Amino acid sequence: MQYEIIQRPSYSALRCVLNKDEEIHAESGAMLAMDATAHITGTMKGGLFQALKRTVLTSESFFVTTITAQSNESEVYLAPRATGDLESIELKGDEYIVQGGSFLAAEPGIETDAKFTGWKGFVSGEGIFMIKARGTGTMFVSSFGGIVHKQIKKGERFIVDNGHIVAFPSSMTYEIRRVGKGIADMVTTGEGLSVEFEGPGTILMQTRNLRTFAETLNPFLRAPHRSQGSGFLGQIFGG
């Protein structure tokens, strides 16, 4: 398979060229366009239980799209849900942890499953489950905003807001923690949970947080019949 990432960095899409019988697995709805000779199917990869677990716990789609080339040089275009960039990650029998919603596609040699990241995430509502990807081949991840690569040296510690993580090697030691010294700091700084990493390894981070962006838009998207009022109280309660 040959591939290139086009329209970078704000509206990135993936262009793949497959030879006969080659295939790529992608998130449901990721197909932008494809050659007329390509064949597309939707399957529950890993069975019913794994498909349910991936959907409920990581916000990924229930069905996985498989696109198979019926002839040589079959062209396929894939695009993520959010506006942002794409990055390729080469796996050689190793394992990566990917934030829910950031997985776009992978070659058949890569398996994905839900990864529990700790009960602290349950308190904040910030993704206590991520995606575990392992195997051999190329994986493609997406971001909301741009992608920043941060290389952490051995023994070095680095803190990343939970909502800005795209992917990192599972070999890295990490711990989910609060920002600041207590609940008061979480409230006054507007930050939730963070992840403290210890090197060596390279973290992929996104420059925007989809959850906080949705919260910013929320007051403008409420239906009129759910309004708390059009006056002063309405402004306080988001009417």
Image (spheres, grey):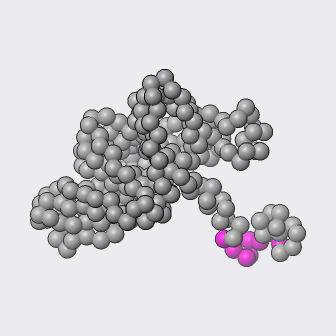
User: Outermost residue, right direction?
Assistant: 232
Rendering quarter of residue 32:
bottom left
In the rendered image, residue 30, in percent from the top left (x then y), is placed at 37, 63
> How many tags in the picture?
0
Q: Is residue 139 above or below residue 202?
A: below
**Magenta span has 112?**
no
Residue drawn at x 54%, y 47% is 164
Position of the N terminus by quadrant: bottom left
In the rendered image, residue 64, in percent from the top left (x then y), is placed at 34, 56
Q: Is residue 1 above or below residue 73?
A: above
Rendering quarter of residue 22:
bottom left
- Span colored in magenta: 221-229
Rendering quarter of residue 233:
bottom right
Please say whether residue 196 is visible from this viewpoint. Answer: yes
In the rendered image, residue 8, in percent from the top left (x then y), is placed at 40, 62
Residue drawn at x 16%, y 71% is 37
Please say whether residue 64 is visible from this viewpoint. Answer: no
Position of the C terminus by quadrant: bottom right
Q: Is residue 56 above or below residue 185?
A: below
Horizontal side, residue 189 vs residue 28: left or right: right
Q: Out of 148 and 130, give the one closest to the viewer.
A: 148
In the rendered image, residue 106, in percent from the top left (x then y), is placed at 30, 51
Q: Out of 228 and 50, give the one closest to the viewer.
A: 228
Horizontal side, residue 201 vs residue 136: left or right: right
Residue drawn at x 47%, y 47% is 148
Horizontal side, residue 107 vs residue 12: left or right: left
Q: Is residue 161 above or below residue 85?
A: above
Residue drawn at x 83%, y 75% is 230
